[in-house]
Amino acid sequence: MQSTLVRLVLALTLTLAPSLAFASDFIPLPEVGGKNKQLEIRFVRYTGGSSGKMIVDIRNKSSKRATFKAKGLFFVPQGDAERAPQRLGAAGPFAVLGQQLDSIKLPASATKRLKLQVFCLDSHRSSPSSGQGFKVAKKRLPKRLQNTIESGAQRILRKPKGGAANSEIQSHVWKTRNKKWIKLEGERKREKSSSGLRQRRMNRRHHQQRIQIQSIQSIQ
């Protein structure tokens, strides 16, 4: 009985370890041109996979109802930027209590846990895995960049339902980023050097294979 209990405690510890290791404190929600005085955000964990989700908590510290929008938020991997995987940006709707929403109103003093749909921002870096630690960037993406990414994502989501939507959005995000490179928090010393060419090709090849698989699944 005692050995069974020990194994159960160990299993729970290993399962919760990524969240406990990387969950951050609340910080003011970044906004274009400043910080939101009502809302706070904290990183909880990243789920990884072909359709990665960023789990965050949003807290309304004020005495009035406040609106949260994910547009333009991005996340910087913890650790040395020279070896870190891709940064991740929020695009499209997010999930809360099983609903897909573009914005949510938080009552006074309320806290909500959200699943943000995120996409890789650096095509030449490796993809982050589940359990990778992140921090919320101090600022949102530059306005023009976030508007182009968001409008493209919404256009793709309005198309007839299909299994390849996330892959198409990812291609759109990479194309937008690479068209006119803008330095962001967590930048490497030589972010766009030729040494990243092989990794870009590997990422794109893997990405194209995933599109083919998802397209076949949507037909079946």
Image: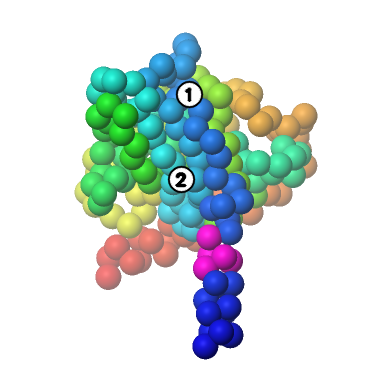
**Left or right of 23, for residue 189:** right
Question: Residue 28: which numbered mark, if any?
Answer: 1
Residue in view at x 51 percent, y 55 percent: 48
* Region in magenta: 12-16
Q: Amino acid at mark 2?
A: Met
**Left or right of 41, for residue 220:** left
Quadrant where the C terminus sits is bottom left
Q: Which residue of the protein is positioned furthest toward the top in this rendering?
A: 33
- Tell me if I can see residue 116 in this picture: yes
In the picture shown, does residue 216 fall above or below 18? Answer: below
Residue mark closest to the camera, 2 vs 1: 1
Residue in view at x 32 percent, y 29 percent: 109
- Magenta region, mostly helix, strand or loop? helix
Give 105 or 109, whichever is nearer the viewer: 109
Q: Which residue is mark 2?
A: 54
In the picture shown, does residue 165 fall above or below 8? Answer: above
Under circle 2, the secondary element is strand
Where is residue 104 drawn, in percent x and y? 26, 32
Residue in view at x 38 percent, y 32 percent: 59
Q: Amino acid at mark 1?
A: Pro
Where is residue 121 drawn, in percent x and y? 55, 37
